Image (tube, rainbow, N blue to C red):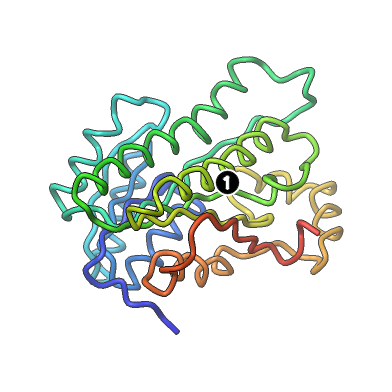
Amino acid sequence: MQPDLTGRVAFVTGATSGLGRHFALVLARAGASVAVAGRRAERLATLRSEIEKGGGKCVDVALDVMDAAQIAPVLDKAEAALGPLDILVNNAGMSADGPIADIATADFDAVMSTNVRGPFLLAQEYGRRLIARKRAGRIINIASIAAFRVLPGSAPYNISKAAIAMMTQCMAREWARYDINVNAICPGFIETELNSDWFESDKGKAHIKSFPKRRLQKAEDLDGMLLLLASDASNAITGALMNVDEAQSL
């Protein structure tokens, strides 16, 4: 089943690479108009061109989720170009790895600001707009299996994803009465710019062999869940933390 998102407008953060870029393309292929947001303007322009060449509608908007002052104006720009937003994909994220005793305060703060504070403020502003318009909507937060289990050497990232899981459920509980569904996708390990060097190393290859399926996931493995949560097929799903991880969390 391929959900039809024609007429819907989606906003995807962290769209300059990795999962964010992939999610924007998937949503566009399903018929949604897509606003792609991130810090690297040239990459956003390339993604917009790719979506438009495929027959989709797209606008690229520069956004650093750590800067709260940017959020409302960026959403204004996206809506001016595409119309009121229906779907928010909170995907922007980063990590700071190493022993807990060695994590610099600035690095910890950057992870929390990017992975938790930014998504919270985006969802908050988006939710305010939906409530004021009496309009239903979808928020899809990208968490991780790190919300449920310790990934050694990545304490700030683990903490941030656990926070995203609870944020998802708090928002779902409070906004259910407004028909705003809030869910989280919790992937396992997928190779991206953040972790490619690790998985190419000998220790990284050994890590892969420890997974139940002895392989990395692919971004495409998340497509079905993304489209389900973005579509009307998920009308009764809210507050769910959806593990899509090939049993890596077990």
Please state the horizontal and vertical placement of residue 134, each as a whole percent of the image: 22, 53
Amino acid type indicated by mark 1: Glu
Q: Quadrant of the N terminus?
A: bottom left
Residue 11, relative to residue 156: is it above or below? below
- The quarter of the picture where residue 54 lies is bottom left
Position above or below: 17 against 227: above
In the current view of this chain or complex, which residue is farthest to the front? Answer: 177
Closest to the observer: 169 or 107? 169
Asked whether, in this view, residue 111 is left or right of residue 157, the answer is left
Residue 48 drawn above or below residue 54: above
Q: What is the tally of numbered marks visible in this picture?
A: 1
Q: Nearer the viewer, residue 243 or 235?
A: 235
Q: Nearer the viewer, residue 232 or 43?
A: 232
Identify the residue at horizontal 61%, vertical 35% (top origin): 160
Q: Secondary structure at mark 1?
A: loop
Q: Residues within 10 Å of mark 1 (few under 14, many from 20)?
A: few
Q: Position of residue 246 (x, y in %)?
A: 72, 67
- Quadrant in the rendering for residue 215: bottom right
- Residue at x 78%, y 34% (from the top left corner): 153
Residue drawn 28% across the image and 66% down it:
32
Please identify the quadrant where the C terminus is shown: bottom right
At x 67%, y 16%, the residue is 104
In the figure, 157 relative to 17: above or below? above
Q: Residue 212: where, in percent of width, then height?
A: 83, 66
- Residue 11: percent from the left, percent from the top? 32, 51
- Horizontal arrangement in the rendering, residue 132 relative to residue 1 (left or right): left
Residue placed under numbered mark 1 in the picture: 193
In the picture as drawn, the residue positioned furthest to the top comes out as 105
Most distant residue in the bottom direction? 1
